[in-house]
Amino acid sequence: MKKHFLSIFLFFVFLSSQSFSESITFQDDDHIGWSCGSLSMYCLPQQEIDNHFNLVSENVLERWDTLIGNQIFSLYSPGRDNDSLTKEFNELNNLRLSLWIKDYDQFPCESNPFFKLSQELLLNNKFRQVNCISFEHSLTDPSYNSSCIQIKKRRFFALEGPMDNNVSCFFKLLSNWNVSSLVRLTDDIDHKTGKSKCFPYWTDLVFEKNSQTFLQIPVKAQYETPVSKWGRLVVPYFVWPDWDDHKGVNSEKLVNFINQARNNNTSEDDIIAVHCSAGVGRTGTFIACLCLLDEIDEQLEKGLLPENLQLSIARLFLHLNFYRPWLVSTPSQYITLYRTVEWYLNYKKGDK
């Protein structure tokens, strides 16, 4: 037995001497996925990732059953005006606030025990905006402000855009959890106000191949370390840099953009990481619309006609806000959900 353990120990010592000090030789740019020359590079076991998403889903289900139960939500109906949708948003906004916080008019606001913010992120200043911190029960990892979301077979990270002091944590999160795609919905600055929105982590890490954009995620390195000395995870990269903060967007353009991400993520194990600046408004709008398109396609495949679909945007909106606060932040973003469903159903009916 002692000889057996000694052999294993010497084997790993040999590997260390051969591999860990060597630099990485990258494969060609058409290699999508992992590329490495060091045995120190690895990601979480798939079973552990599955278990974490399942736990988050169970946490959300427990809260939903306790607080919402069998409450009936309004179904989608075409032709609603913006005023009625704004009124619906305001009612839902008041409802989510009443779920998260015991008394919103009190200062400081006391959180509902079911919706405690991540104390690790809060106490260690790992956030952009204090009101946009992940809930404890849906936190991806204590190192970064990211929430796990699972809607049917879709898995998402809703996360804030990195800052200059945590971009290495951002990269490590994406690589450790082996994300399948990354979606960015902001630029590095707001060009109207000059306010910083996201550290430009993509500089020198983006390339085009066959009309598609990819991001090379450096692994096991501080950002300042040259990428060529380390391994990388190469993922499809979808960017909408001029989506204004707090605003909605054109529905046709949004559907086309979302379909690019949908077509690249067909496995149940795929994780689509989505960020804007704070990781709530635009991020939530993107995730909600993607889930709505999935639901429409699923019902159409079952033989339902577009005019007979059973679809509740209000319910999905509230459900998402059990995973992360402020997903879909403003009336204009909520209106975008309706207009996108409206446009997509007309498209499916042939009324382009």
Image (tube, rainbow, N blue to C red):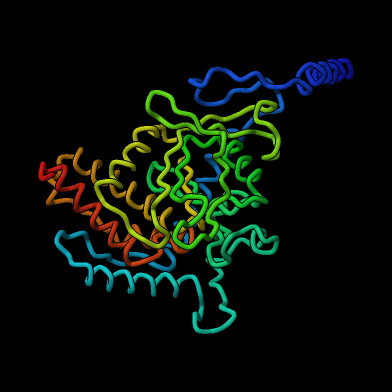
Q: Quadrant of residue 174?
A: top right
Vertical arrangement, residue 282 with respect to residue 182, above or below: below
The residue under the point 45% across, 71% down is 99
Q: Nearer the viewer, residue 296 or 275?
A: 275
The residue under the point 50% across, 84% down is 105
Vertical arrangement, residue 228 with respect to residue 260, above or below: above
Q: Quadrant of residue 317?
A: bottom left
Vertical arrangement, residue 109 with respect to residue 33, above or below: below
Q: Quadrant of residue 311?
A: bottom left
Left or right position of 75 against 31: left
Left or right position of 310 against 156: left
The residue under the point 52% across, 37% down is 179
Residue 237: image location, x then y, percent: 45, 36
Q: Is residue 147 visible?
A: no
Quadrant of the frame with the C terminus: top left
Count of numbered labels shown in the rendering: 0
Q: Residue furthest bottom?
A: 106
Residue 149: image location, x then y, percent: 46, 50
Residue 79: image location, x then y, percent: 14, 61
Q: Nearer the viewer, residue 26 or 295?
A: 26
Vertical arrangement, residue 229 with respect to residue 125, above or below: above
